[in-house]
Amino acid sequence: MTINTILKSDGPAIDEPVPSRYALNVGDIEILVISDGILPIPSHVLAHNVEPDVLDDWLDAQFLPREIAEWPLNVLVVRSGDQVILVDAGLGMDPNLKLEKAGRLVQRLEAAVIALSSITDVVITHMHMDHIGGLVIDGTHERLRSDLRVHVAAAEVEFWKDPDFSKTLMPQGFPDALRATAKRFMEQYGSQIRTFETEAQVAPGVTAQLTGGHTPGHCIVRVASRGDRLTFVGDAIFQVGFEQPEWFNGFEHDPEEAARVRIGLLRQFAETREAFVATHLPFPSIYHVAMAGDAFRAVPAVWDY
Ligand SMILES: [Zn+2]
């Protein structure tokens, strides 16, 4: 089979030439970062509270194109004891938005020999389509366990009953697609959802913590075992967020609060020297934060395999 036929194959992605998963351990807890693919998003969404030429200069300096920013899309699988926890679920399918380079989670779980039926828990950092869409692909719900526990902050469930998009700046079509996907997710998984107010212990060493900001019920997932730690920050930190933590991302429903959350986490990681994984940082998305004067600097982890 040539590389091209592999890339065009719709079947299980076992033979994909580019690795889509990265394994690491946090103490006794096993973690896989899985790439769901890439989201091409208009670059101006990265910062809607600065002049366009300021953003263009930043994009040039980062060797990023001015028109379209490619957002990596990462998901976590965590094994703690006898629990298998999926943290977020990727984009799924939305043919109207033409985001064909993402939505690979299910086939990449299969490639990693992780059966959907082995997943005991799901943590949803927030109910944007690129974090829940993989769960609402036709046929997926039926393949998951009937006793699956889905952990979502109570504030997130409440928010999506009547979501406020007034402070966002999303590309055309996105607000409607996000509303529709969140509605579908609640219809399919509502009875399996276990809400929490500020914090929930999902498994030994695995805790979901409310941050708010990006969405009112946005949460992060802390993993800790034998003195080792890692945090999955969801959409609290974007690539631009190290140098420009106060730039408002168009997907943030409360951008001022999102900036406060981001700066708080970056300061914390710089202080504790703890590693983190973010949904939209380049795969495998394992980073440390260093301080350069007052500025934050991203330090990617060395590929260790
Ligand atoms: Zn996202």
Image (cartoon, helix red, strand yellow):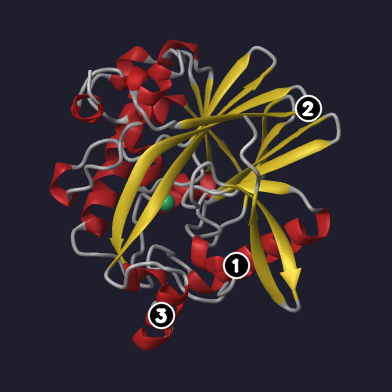
**Inter-mark Cα distance, 1 to 3:** 14 Å
Residue 18 sits in quarter: top left
**Inter-mark Cα distance, 1 to 2:** 27 Å
Compared to 221, does 82 lie above or below?
above
Residue type marked 2 = Gly
Sequence-first disc among 2 and 3: 2
Residue 16 rendering spot, x and y as whole percentages: 34, 26
- Front in this rendered view, residue 236 or 27: 27
Marker disc for residue 55: 3
Residue type marked 3 = Leu
Pointer 2 with pointer 3, Cβ within 8 A: no
Asked whether mark 3 lies closer than 8 Å to ligand 1, one says no
Task: Please say whether residue 48 is visible from this viewpoint.
Answer: yes
Sequence-first disc among 1 and 2: 2
Residue topped by disc 1: 242
**Residue at 38% from the left image edge and 78% from the top image edge:** 48
Structural crowding at the residue carrying mark 1, measured as other residues with C-alpha within 10 Å and reported as few (<14), some (14–19) or many (≥20): some
Structural crowding at the residue carrying mark 2, measured as other residues with C-alpha within 10 Å and reported as few (<14), some (14–19) or many (≥20): some
**Inter-mark Cα distance, 2 to 3:** 40 Å
Residue 58 rendering spot, x and y as whole percentages: 45, 78
Task: Please say whether residue 51 is visible from this viewpoint.
Answer: no
Residue topped by disc 2: 27
Residue type marked 1 = Phe
Pointer 1 with pointer 2, Cβ within 8 A: no
- Residue at disc 1, secondary structure: loop
Marker disc for residue 149: none
**Residue at 46% from the left image edge and 18% from the top image edge:** 112
- Residue at disc 2, secondary structure: loop
